[in-house]
Amino acid sequence: MSSLPLEVALLMRVTPPPVWLLDWYDLGSEVALVMQRPEPCVDLLDYITEQESKCLETTVAQGIFPQLVEAAIEMEAKGVFHRDIKPDNILIETGADVPRGRFIDFGCGTTFTPGQMFDEPQVLQ
């Protein structure tokens, strides 16, 4: 690869990163990322399905979602647009009293400038 992969560049641009990128490898047709995995953790989709009621308790949602909104605001301030926010791409750290939410998988992400309209990903400059 002649340049830094966009997903790597996006993770490096967001500080502090939602999940630490430890290393990355160019495998020719794909890129392998070595990332931090906080323990214990699970993605939001699995977290919800593991609940007896199959939904989030209000107090849990009130703890997780403000964190995610704050992270999205921080990404916007850094010019990073995730473009694939869904339960599978939200990691929930479950080891603390209050679960912590983090965005993961920036593979569909891109950069932007305020007011920019999207139709295709742009190359990071």
Image (cartoon, rainbow, N blue to C red):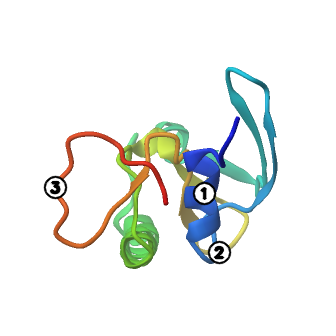
Nearer to the camera, 51 or 25: 25
Whether label 3 touches label 2, CB < 8 Å: no
Label 1 or label 2, whichever lies nearer to me, is: 1
Sort mark 3 into few (<14), some (14-19) or many (20+) by Cα contacts within 10 Å.
Answer: few
Say which residue label 1 marks: 9
Residue at 57 percent of width and 69 percent of height:
13
Q: Quadrant of residue 15?
A: bottom right
Label 2 SS: loop
Residue 32 is marked as none
Residue positioned 69% across, 71% down in the render: 96
- Disc 1 packing (10 Å; few <14; some 14–19; many ≥20): some
Residue at x 45%, y 72% (from the top left corner): 71
Furthest residue in direction front, as rendered: 2
- How packed is label 2: few (under 14 Cα within 10 Å), some, or many (20 or more)? few
Horizontal and vertical percent for residue 7?
57, 48
Q: Is residue 40 above or below residue 98?
A: above
- Type of residue at label 2? Asp
Tell me the quarter of the image containing the N terminus: top right
Do tag 1 and tag 3 residues touch (Cβ < 8 Å)?
no
Q: Which residue is mark 3?
A: 117
Going by the numbered disc 3, the residue's amino acid type is Met
Q: Which residue is mark 2?
A: 97
State the SS at label 1.
helix
Q: CA distance from mark 3 to mark 2?
A: 40 Å
Q: Earlier in the sequence, mark 3 or mark 2?
A: 2
Observer-nearest residue: 96 or 6? 6
Q: Earlier in the sequence, mark 1 or mark 2?
A: 1
Does 114 sit left or right of 19 as displayed? left
x, y (%) of residue 37?
Answer: 77, 52
